[in-house]
């Protein structure tokens, strides 16, 4: 009887792994062909995917992973200060679609590698306000509120998916496994699409002034992109919606609805560059900003250990 039970269990686990069948056994199936270096690079983006999932879900639907897909959090703490945004029906619909896409991204990554629990994230209005103040190098009055209206929410969203997609571009040539490269290509496709939609929506409003600041949408994007370049510390890898013609496609046009290098290819960033940006500190070993306790996964934790060692903790 024991032998029969063991055989049945193994069969169920095999079926679950090979066909995606949901069984009553809490088992995750990972490819043994993925090298450890790939695992680290595939797990790192979960930091950004968690952030996007929560920000979009709360912004459009007023609830997040704890309500819609609590198993994806793996017991990690809920985000700080995230809220439902005051969105028009069309923008709300688009952002809701983004949210569900991010849920899928979390599932896809965790189907391939083990992953880690949702890290503590600060998505409060104050965090976004600080980012905008840093972008303009002065306090905006009143403080920027990402949840106040369509324009503010789109500008806040401009801060997020592009950082993630540059990470996928940067990771792709370092991956060894075809399984890993296929996953990253799929993730990159949708992340790039999200960024394109956001940029197009903002481009339509490029010369509209953001109330009550009297600053155009285009200038906001230019300042945000400049801040990310500054924090990343690896040169120009980010551009706003309106640029000098020499920076546009083929060096001939100021409109910049999609950002790319001199060949209109997407820029890539390393995990360290991304951490410098999302922490808002310009240092991969100094947490803050959207991640008050830092990111998770081997790559992010290796830098945090360095930080805490310096502090003598």
Image (cartoon, grey):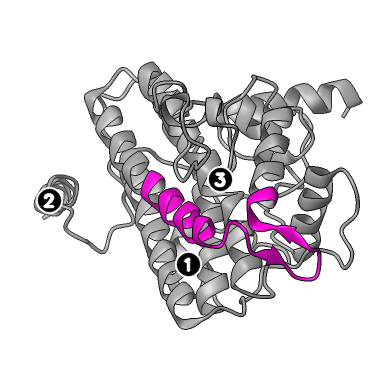
Magenta segment range? 192-219
Give how far apart the Cα atoms at labels 2 and 1 are. Answer: 23 Å
Please tell me whether mark 3 sits on a helix, a strand or a loop: loop
Q: Identify whether 299 is placed above or below 54.
A: above
| Frontmost residue, 135 versus 215 | 215
Please tell me whether mark 2 sits on a helix, a strand or a loop: helix
- Which residue is pictured at 74% across the width and 64% down the height? 124
- Identify the image quadrant of residue 279: top right
Instruction: Tell me which label, 2 or 1, sits earlier in the chain.
Output: 2
Whether residue 116 is visible = no
Residue wearing tag 1? 70
Instruction: Tell me which label, 3 or 1, sits earlier in the chain.
Output: 1
Q: Which of marks 3 and 1 is in front?
A: 3
Query: Which quarter of the rendering shows the C terminus?
Result: top right
Query: Which quarter of the rendering shows the N terminus?
Result: bottom left
CB atoms of marks 3 and 1 within 8 Å: no
Residue 88 in picture, x, y percent from top left: 52, 81
Q: Identify whether 81 is placed above or below 162.
A: below
Whether residue 226 is visible = yes
> Which numbered dot is residue 295?
none
> Which numbered dot is residue 241?
3
Would residue 36 appear left or right of 61 to someone viewing this image? left
Would residue 58 appear left or right of 123 to someone viewing this image? left
Q: Is residue 216 magenta?
A: yes
Please tell me whether mark 1 sits on a helix, a strand or a loop: helix
Q: Residues within 10 Å of mark 2 (few under 14, many from 20)?
A: few
Q: Identify whether 272 is placed above or below 103.
A: above
> Which numbered dot is residue 19?
2
């Amino acid at each position: 009887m024991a032998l029969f039970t063991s055989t049945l269990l193994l069969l169920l686990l095999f079926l679950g792994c090979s066909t995606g069948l949901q069984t009553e056994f809490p088992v995750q199936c990972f490819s043994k062909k993925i090298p450890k270096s790939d695992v680290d690079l595939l797990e790192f983006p979960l930091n950004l995917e968690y952030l996007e999932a929560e920000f979009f879900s709360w912004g459009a639907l007023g609830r997040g992973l704890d309500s819609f897909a609590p198993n994806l959090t793996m017991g990690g703490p809920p985000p700080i200060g995230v809220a439902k945004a005051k969105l028009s029906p069309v923008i709300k619909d688009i952002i809701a679609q983004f949210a569900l896409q991010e849920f899928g991204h979390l599932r896809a990554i965790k189907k391939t590698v083990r992953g880690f629990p949702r890290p503590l994230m600060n998505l409060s209005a104050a965090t976004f306000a600080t980012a905008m103040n840093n972008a303009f190098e002065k306090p905006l009055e009143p403080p920027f509120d990402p949840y106040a209206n369509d324009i503010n929410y789109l500008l806040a969203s401009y801060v997020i998916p592009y950082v993630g997609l540059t990470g996928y571009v940067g990771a792709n040539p370092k991956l060894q496994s075809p399984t890993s490269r296929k996953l990253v290509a799929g993730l990159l496709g949708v992340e790039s699409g999200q960024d394109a939609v956001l940029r197009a929506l903002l481009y339509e409003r490029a010369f509209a002034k953001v109330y009550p600041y009297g600053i155009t949408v285009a200038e906001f994007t230019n300042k945000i992109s400049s801040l990310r370049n500054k924090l990343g510390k690896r040169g120009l890898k980010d551009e706003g919606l309106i640029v000098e013609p020499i920076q546009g496609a083929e060096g001939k046009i100021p409109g910049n609805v999609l950002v790319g290098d001199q060949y209109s290819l997407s820029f890539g960033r390393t995990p360290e560059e991304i951490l410098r940006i999302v922490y808002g500190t310009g240092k991969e070993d100094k947490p803050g900003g959207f991640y008050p306790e830092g990111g998770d996964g081997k790559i992010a934790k290796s830098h945090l250990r360095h930080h805490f060692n310096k502090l003598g903790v």
